[in-house]
Amino acid sequence: MNELIVKLRFLIPTLPRAERAVAQALLEKPELICFMTLAELARETDSSDASVIRFCRKMGYSGFTDMKRAFANALNDSNITTVEEIRKEDSVLDNLHKVYKSNMQSLSDTILLADADAYEAAAQALLAAKSIHFFGAGDSAAICQLFYFKFHRLGIPGSAQQDAVMQLIEASNLKPGDVAVAISYEGKSRTVVNAMRIAKERGATIICITKMSKSPLLKLSDINLFIATSDVTVGRDIVARRMAEQMIIDTLYLTLLVRSEKDYTKHLNSTSKFLEMNKIKGREFK
């Protein structure tokens, strides 16, 4: 059942009003569909038969009967996972367990949203890339720096500028064959969206890592990789999303490492040898 709940939750922001009403009703009462005809569900949600059918197809089903069967099967072995919020009275150890559960749930839900074709397209784009550039604002910029470092160790040209003006300059220097990876949870960061507008004009391939929602970033992106979060954070700072973003980039990085015809392993070993120079040796402790 958890897979259907995840799909419903993250599809809702992308839907028009009538289809959103159907999704919201099923999110609140997933058993609803099992006891209703197509016409009854349309009436119950103040939508139309056509809207329900369109929603079924967006969920990945051929029609109402197909989706009804899927919900019935899922309800028979219902396993909806919930994540508890962190409260003032919780111990630090309690919070450790809750953050762990939230992170694990986010990773699992992100996998449920994964589109095989999109991931393959992203991997192929990176394999063929002349250079790879990361764009993010705020704490997304920290993730960009981490993965620029990893790809740069392979000898792949690229960048991960933190300054907004420098990101625009970097985007203006992109060319066809270059790849821009944009990381923005809501897809509304002005810095990132403006940089991707320029990257689009320059002919670069754009991969975005974001939540499933209508956003300016998705309109510019060539390849969309979606993250899901089940967060326990107080306020709007969604900690668990970083784990999902890291999983996606790590997956693409390791795929590139093993699939590429270039001997990246040799290059990685070479840079690792020189990085050893930055480590304090045992005799230096004496």
Image (cartoon, rainbow, N blue to C red):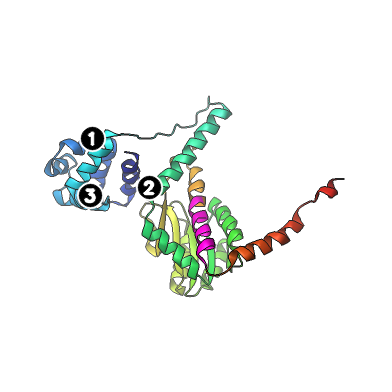
**Label 3, label 2: how far apart the Cα atoms are:** 17 Å
Q: Earlier in the sequence, mark 1 or mark 2?
A: 1
Say which of marks 1 and 2 sits in front. Answer: 2
- Mark in the foreground, 3 or 2: 2
Judging depth in this view, the residue of 203 and 191 nearest the camera is: 203
Q: Indicate left or right for 135 with 272 as reference.
A: left
Instruction: Determine whether label 1 and label 3 are within 8 Å by CB.
Output: no
Kind of residue sitting beneath label 1? Glu
Q: Amino acid at mark 2?
A: Leu
Among the two numbered marks 3 and 2 on one chain, the one whose residue lies closer to the N terminus: 3
Q: Residue at x 25, y 38 (%)?
A: 73
Kindly identify which residue carries mark 1: 31
Label 2 Cα crowd, 10 Å radius (few <14 / some 14-19 / many 20+): some
Locate residue 158, reporting x and y percent.
57, 67
Residue under circle 2?
112
Residue sitting nearer the eye, 161 or 58: 58
User: Alpha-carbon distance for marks 1 and 3?
Assistant: 15 Å
Residue 238 seen in the current view = no
Mark 3 — residue?
A: 56
Along the polypeptide, which appears first: circle 1 or circle 3? 1
Residue 163 or residue 127, whichever sits in front:
127
Residue segment shown in magenta: 247-260
Q: Amino acid at mark 3?
A: Cys
Within the magenta stretch, is there residue 251?
Answer: yes
Q: Is residue 209 visible?
A: yes
**Where does residue 75 sit, x and y in percent of width and height?**
27, 35
Badge 1 marks a residue whose secondary structure is helix
Q: CA distance from mark 1 to mark 2?
A: 21 Å
In this rendering, the answer to whether 233 lies above or below 203 is: above
Does residue 170 belong to the magenta stretch? no
User: Residue sitting at 48 percent across and 60 percent down?
Assistant: 182
